[in-house]
Amino acid sequence: MKTQLFFVLILALTLASCAGGGNESSQSESAPAEKETAAAPVDNKAAGEKIFRTYCITCHGIDGKLGLNGAKDLTVSEISMEERINQVTNGKGLMTPFKDILTEEQIQQVAEYTVSLKTN
């Protein structure tokens, strides 16, 4: 019984140390990539789309038309870029304010991307 308990304890410690070690190497490996990305020119539309897919499609849908939880149809939105930035930054109604989640640049990118969803 003591041998089994000892084995389980050793196994748990080994797994825990491996998991911790993996995170450290991931961080050190990804840090240079982030620096390289920061130096490279940013494709604002692609960056905005990535942010939209991460944070917005749950309510607005992939095409901007979903309308879940009262989300507006972005394909018919007539609001100005300034209003879009304000709504992403501060939220509106049930919409999450992203001022503490995204940078100003990311808010600008996603606001610009939402314009591309608009149909004529």
Image (cartoon, rainbow, N blue to C red):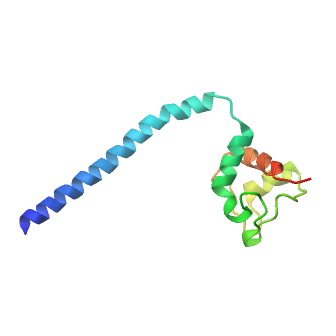
Q: Residue furthest bottom?
A: 69
Q: Which residue lies furthest to the left in this view?
A: 2
29 lies above or below 13: above
Where, by quadrant of the figure, is residue 26 drawn?
top left
Where, by quadrant of the figure, is residue 7 drawn?
bottom left
> For the image shown, how many numbered marks are present on the structure?
0
| Quadrant in which the N terminus is drawn | bottom left
Q: Residue at x 67, y 63 (%)?
A: 58
Q: In this view, does 5 lie to the left or right of 99?
A: left
Nearer to me, 72 or 31:
72
Nearer to me, 58 or 21:
58
- Visible residue check, residue 100: no
Measured as percent of width and height from the top left, residue 115 is found at 83, 49
28 lies above or below 68: above
Q: Which residue is drawn at 74% across and 41% down?
A: 45
Q: Is residue 75 left or right of residue 61?
A: right
Measured as percent of width and height from the top left, residue 72 is found at 81, 65
Measured as percent of width and height from the top left, residue 27 is found at 44, 40
- Visible residue check, residue 1: yes
Q: Which residue is drawn at 27% across and 53% down?
A: 15
Where, by quadrant of the figure, is residue 5 drawn?
bottom left
71 lies above or below 50: below
Q: Residue at x 85, y 49 (%)?
A: 81
Q: In this view, does 16 lie to the left or right of 43?
A: left
Measured as percent of width and height from the top left, residue 60 is found at 74, 62
